[in-house]
Amino acid sequence: MGLYDAYLAVRHRLHDGEPPAHVAIVVTERDLLVDGAFDTLAEALGWALEYGAERVTVSVSVLDESVVPTLTRELRRLDAPAPFVVRGPDDAAVAEGTDGDGDEGADAGTADAPIRITVGLGGKAEFAAAVREIASDVDAGALDPGSIDADDVTDRLVFPEEPDLVIKTGAERLSDFAIWQSVYAELYFTDVNWRDFRRRDYLRAVLDFQDRQRRFGR
């Protein structure tokens, strides 16, 4: 760790504000096509857990669906610091991951894994799937239309937990990430491209979060 990184780490440790417990990182398929991109991702996951996150969600935005199998295969090989799960557009297909020691954790393959990675699973598609499931339950008489509330939608999402902090590199857009779950999240955009993303960039995002006063829509 360089001196500047160490300085940021000290600022984080001494800060009165709580660090984000759930961090979401949004990357694109182009980000992962750069040499060393998967190593950067593994390191970023480690930084997140090191600096207070209990859960990390990674969303890989995909324009060309033909690359999903390749990305999923490579992500399953990720040298991650904790058990993880990978899900693609077909949320019935679950790819179980391992931790950095090559051992599958007890929660790997489930939504309880501390690291969750989605590939090409856009927020609009996820929300539409939840609506279809609700409509099916109503049609079957299992759900009263008049009683439908936000919890009914949340319960039908692939990864329903709401992130505290969403980090997006390279451009100020969410790339169709978790439009339901991130409604109250703090958003952090950096013009640093993913290939250049370093520990200091992650710490800047955490410190920015700690400096904010969260309002949760109020």
Image (cartoon, rainbow, N blue to C red):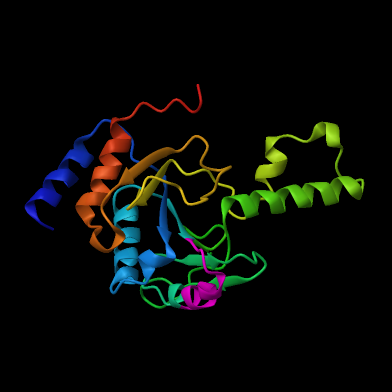
**Extreme top residue here?**
218
**Extreme left residue here?**
3
Residue drawn 57% across the image and 60% down it? 121
> Visible in this render: residue 64?
yes
Q: Nearer the viewer, residue 115 or 196?
A: 196
The quadrant of the rendering that contains the N terminus is bottom left
Residue drawn 34% across the image and 66% down it? 42
Residue 49, compared with residue 11, is above or below; it is below
Residue 165 lies in quadrant: top left
Image location of residue 18, percent across then percent down: 33, 35
Name the chief secondary structure element in magenta: helix
Residue 195 lies in quadrant: bottom left
Residue 144, compared with residue 5, is above or below; it is above
Image location of residue 210, percent across then percent down: 30, 34
Image location of residue 5, percent across then percent down: 14, 51
Residue drawn 87% across the image and 37% down it? 144
Q: Nearer the viewer, residue 135 or 143?
A: 135
Image location of residue 166, percent across then percent down: 41, 45
Q: Nearer the viewer, residue 81 or 200?
A: 200
Picture mark count = 0
Query: Quick check: 136 left or right of 104?
Result: right
Residue 201, compared with residue 187, is above or below; it is below
Q: Is residue 24 rendered magenta in the image?
A: no
> Visible in this render: residue 81?
no
Question: What span is in magenta?
Answer: 61-73
Query: Quick check: 101 left or right of 202?
Result: right
